Amino acid sequence: MTDLLVRTFIRNSQNIQDPAVREKYGVLSGGVGICLNLLLSLGKFFAGLLTGSIAVTADAFNNLSDAGSSVVTLVGFKLAGQKADDGHPFGHGRIEYLAGLLVSLLILMVGVELGKSSIEKILHPEEVAFSLVTVVILACSILVKLWMCLFNRKLGRRIGSAAMEATATDSLSDVVATSAVLAGTLVNHLARVNIDGWVGVVVALFILRAGWGAARDTVNPLLGASPEPELVRAIEKLVLSHKQVVGMHDLVIHDYGPGRRMCSFHAEVPQDEDIMAAHDAIDHIEREILEKFGIETTVHMDPIATGDPEVNALREQVGELVRQIHPDMTIHDFRVTLGPQHRNLIFDAVVPHKCPLSDPEITQRITQAVQGQVPGSYVVLQLDHPYVERD
């Protein structure tokens, strides 16, 4: 069904890097969500009035809020699909994350209100009437919401949308919540035990849990979360496959919304390499990353000494001394300059975020270790902190 809807309403659906295509995915998801959630909400309102059940009525409000969330998702994708302009040269893609965050906040608000109403029902219980129509409506709602979860999850994973993933999570929580309401209705009828208010509390907790998880997933990219380790490894493998490049460091990936990433890094090339050949390789790497990953890239070329055995030996020795301070610490841009009475060892050290030492402590320990093991040396050190996660 999902593939049929995509083929029917989205032309060129495979080109998910195109903002216009992403916008159509968002419109499809939002349109389906609005229609189905409104129908479910009306059905449950009717059932809630028929039986006087707070749990069923609260579930109706939950579906009504889902319809509102679908409107937010639809509007968010429409806004995110706008082209870049002078004021926003990287486009408007982050609006999609904001839409997902707003959906999450709506979910949390519904959970809080539902919890309050359910507690009131526990403190002041009322008789709940049984209706076969209510059972049928709730059972159909479970099936519809299960399909909506699978539908939005498939679309979300296809285009990498946090907003759709949040909607899918919400639908799954609705399946659990409505199942609890249905179970409570049957228990109340068959066992003559009124657990309507308690079921409402369970539903509220599921909704709050789903809202919190969805909020976390949408806030992370807005805060500048580290890119996926798999992507980092793939970029490094591509770059180092070129024989002109012997190393890379300072990889930074900026996320301006789904399909709108930019990255930069330093590529180490032998200092005696033909400059035009190295520059041509760098240009080729930039094009490859854009074609393979859809990421616009800027590469800074760092010439390093690779043919000097003494420099290579010193690089290995200093690298080992640095790893003794922290096993995940690395060095790059290692250079040696000679003075009349000493030599300068110039390099950068990359300090992992989990290192417990402060920058001044690290600088002092590296300097003491190097000068103790390499007599006549003077350390010129720059500390860096990584912008990507490694596992």
Image (spheres, rainbow, N blue to C red):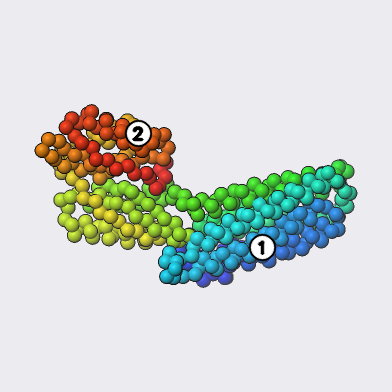
Quadrant (top left/top right/bottom left/bottom right) for the N terminus: bottom right
For the residue carrying disc 1, how many other residues have a C-alpha within 10 Å: few (<14), some (14-19), or many (20+)?
Answer: some
Residue 346, placed above or below residue 163: above
Residue 183 is situated, as x and y percent measured from the top left of the image, at 78, 47
Picture quarter containing residue 105? bottom right
Q: Residue at x 64, y 58 (%)?
A: 148
Question: Viewed as shown, does residue 127 lie left or right of 157?
Answer: right
Q: Residue at x 67, y 59 (%)?
A: 66
Secondary structure category for the residue under label 2: helix
Q: Residue at x 41, y 55 (%)?
A: 254
Residue 237 is situated, as x and y percent measured from the top left of the image, at 33, 49
> Which mark is first along the chain, 1 or 2?
1
Secondary structure category for the residue under label 1: helix
Q: Which residue is mark 1?
A: 68
Q: Which residue is mark 2?
A: 361
Question: Viewed as shown, does residue 211 lie left or right of 261?
Answer: right
